[in-house]
Amino acid sequence: MTPTLVRQHLPRTGHGPRVDRRARARDWSEIQERMLVPLYEAVYGRLGVGPGSRLLGLGCGSGLALLMAASRGAAVTGVDASSDRLALARERLLPAGRDARARADVLIVDGSRGDTVHGGAADTAGTAAASGTGAAGGGGPAYTVVTAFEPIGCLAGDADGLSEQLAGAVPLAGRGAAVVLTGWGPPERCATMSVLRAAAGPAEPSRGAGAWRPAHRDDLEDVARRAGLWPDGSGRVACPFGYADADSAVRGLLSTGLFDAATAAADRVQVDKEIAEALHPYERQDGTVWMPNVFRYLIARTP
């Protein structure tokens, strides 16, 4: 929970310990990223992702969703603004010794050189053309599926960030290609929302980008409309967040970047404490933490 559940803007504050970006990326990869596996599976199954699919993953993080698509036979391209997460994605998808044919179907693009994913997506076309894998605008096949698996609908301004990503990605997709947008479900069905709202308290007075806000029913449709896409179905998927213990839960939630605004407004120690306290209702007798959540996805099509 890139951009993916991921907000890439790290806190800039003189209070508390500095953020270890590599450790945060590792926590995302080892603890948090798997929480959305049911969402990935539901989308890929519905769209029939497999051989012949050319998938562009926006905010691909450390590459788990890409790996799942590649295991189905799809050619995949991932773009993310975190070089630390992308390093882990390369380890997963481009390990040493992998055969050349399999490697040709994987492209990882560092979007950190631009302020938005638009820069990364633009680079994708040129990089793909240079490597011979092809992309829309690069003389090769267009993408048939574009995914934005970072759910929006819990922070002010997150829909704007998704719109910026789509501005660069949609021109790389073919006519009628599927563009998958994802969002948090209703707050009453997402236990993690209560944790986010409690721990994000220090950022609330500003009400600026990064402050908590409840999900709106038409968030995804509004983004699709602004991007010139037409809706073609939607669904809801249960994605409970389960952790071995409270410490793992705090580390996993912090790795999403969803608490960066609160950390910038207060300090890391205070935010850690707020998260730990907000998790108490979800701790089980054996020390594990379990938070039921529902996420929504919208399948939109390019004109």
Image: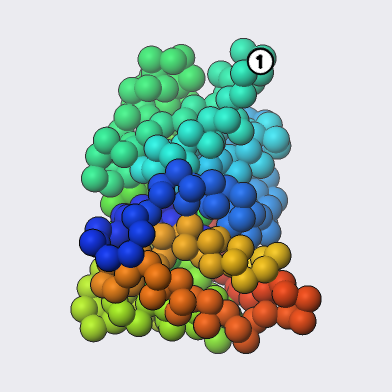
Q: Residue at x 67, y 80 (%)?
A: 283
Badge 1, how many Cα within 10 Å: few under 14, some, many 20+? few
Q: Is residue 230 left or right of residue 203?
A: right
Quarter of the figure with residue 174: top left
Residue 192 visible, this orientation: yes
Residue at point 50% right, 71% down? Answer: 184
Q: How was the colour assigned to the protein in this rendering?
A: rainbow
Q: Residue furthest right?
A: 286
Q: Quadrant of residue 247?
A: bottom right
Query: At 60% from the left edge and 44% from the top edge, which residue is drawn?
Result: 64
The percent coordinates of residue 11 (x first, y second) are: 30, 59
Q: Is residue 147 above or below residue 105?
A: below
> Residue 215 occupies which quadrant of the picture?
bottom left
Q: Nearer the viewer, residue 303 or 156?
A: 156
Residue 298 makes an appearance in the image: no
Q: Position of residue 109 (x, y in %)?
A: 41, 31
Callout 1 amino acid: Gly
Vertical order, 248 against 193 (above or below): above
Return the residue nearer the eye: 58 or 231: 58
Q: Position of residue 169 (x, y in %)?
A: 36, 42
Element type at marker 1?
loop
Viewer-side residue, 222 vs 113 = 113
Residue 170, image x and y in percent?
37, 43
For label 1, the residue is 97
Residue at the image point whose x is 72% and y is 75% from the top? 287
Decide which of 247, 177 is in the foreground and name it.
Answer: 247
Number of numbered labels in the structure image: 1
